[in-house]
Amino acid sequence: MVVDYKKVGFIHLTIFACLLVFAIATTSLARVNDGFLKIYFLDVGQGDAGFIVTPAGRQILIDGGPSDAVLSKISSRMPFYDKDIDVLIASHKHSDHIAGLMSVLDRYDVNNIVDTKIGYSSSEVSKWNQLKLAEGANEIEAKAGGYMDLGEGITITFLHPEDTLEGKTSKNPNDDSIVTMLQYENFRVLFVGDAGAKVENAMMSSDIDLSADVLKVGHHGSATSTSTKFLSAVSPEVATIEVGAKNTFGHPSPIVISRLENNGIKYYRTDADGDIEVVSDGNFFKVNKSK
């Protein structure tokens, strides 16, 4: 019998390549299916981007920052073969929140897009609306009481806006921000977008339970957000501030830093700490930073 060693070698090489791909894939899958909820407050400059990975590997992105820098941040935390994002939430329509989301829509298949129907005129918002339409995702209008059950004991509850914003216009989208409570069993994280004191007061005057273990500080630490009363209502153990290094806005305000310190709240900021990772098993949590 004549053996074609070139052919045998090719077969062996093919089998090896298949096994290598399988090993990489299963390793990547194991990396996200480890029983922990992971929340990444990403260092994307002067803007917000919060990336959430559930124990089963579902992904939620809350805002995308001011540029496409978010793409490398999230791709490094996803299996290489995964081109889907389960939920994308645009807290409001300022460029430091939605510019990066548009890059995400260009690269990934998004299953659900959460937005408000507030009218806000800008060329960037027009592009955003066009990209949403082209994506063909299930679009969800956020309003207080809205609820998403992601399974695994994980829920997303919308606390603001109070009602539909359809047909309304806004000169300042900050106060139309989607406020989101993420809960995994007994662990809670509150994302407030750029909501200011007006929204904070409205939520405190309602029957909403604002208590959370982690607070994403509003409006990058602006003094117009994160009042002392609001901090008392939320009573977080940890706060995160998404802010660009040497930004021209003076964020975070020393006033907000003092409020956090006076309330005994440990805080992290992306300009100083880089990407901030919060990991929870549904009861306890720990914080890691990249700098």
Image: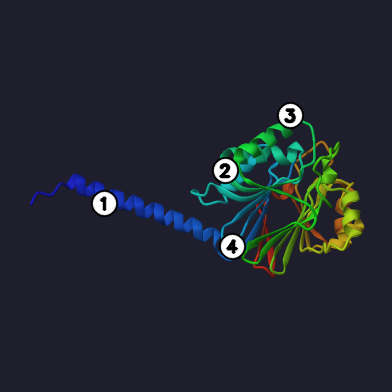
The Cα atoms of the two marked residues, 3 and 4, are separated by 38 Å
Residue toward you, 86 or 37? 86
Secondary element under disc 3, as helix, strand or loop, is: helix
Tags 1 and 2 touching, CB below 8 Å: no
Secondary element under disc 1, as helix, strand or loop, is: helix
Question: In the rendered structure, which disc, 3 or 2, sits on the residue that comes first in sequence?
Answer: 2
At 78% across and 48% down in the image, what residue appears?
Answer: 193
Residue toward you, 240 or 137? 137
Give the residue type that dot 3 points to. Ser
Tags 3 and 4 touching, CB below 8 Å: no
Q: Which residue is mark 4?
A: 55
The Cα atoms of the two marked residues, 1 and 3, are separated by 55 Å
Mark 1 against mark 4, which lies toward the viewer? Answer: 4
Residue 286 on image: x %, y %? 68, 63
Q: Is residue 68 above or below residue 156?
A: above
Residue toward you, 58 or 10? 58
Mark 4 against mark 2, which lies toward the viewer? Answer: 2
Give the residue type that dot 2 points to. Tyr
Q: Is residue 127 above or below residue 252?
A: above
Secondary element under disc 4, as helix, strand or loop, is: loop
Q: Which residue is mark 3?
A: 123
User: In the image, which disc is placed on residue 12?
Assistant: 1
Residue 144 visible in image: yes
Secondary element under disc 2, as helix, strand or loop, is: loop
Q: Which residue is mark 2?
A: 108
Mark 1 against mark 2, which lies toward the viewer? Answer: 2
Q: Residues within 10 Å of mark 1 (few under 14, many from 20)?
A: few
Question: In the rendered view, does 113 fall on the left or right side of 259?
Answer: left
Mark 1 against mark 3, which lies toward the viewer? Answer: 3
Tags 1 and 4 touching, CB below 8 Å: no
At 76% across and 45% down in the image, what residue appears?
Answer: 116
Give the residue type that dot 1 points to. His
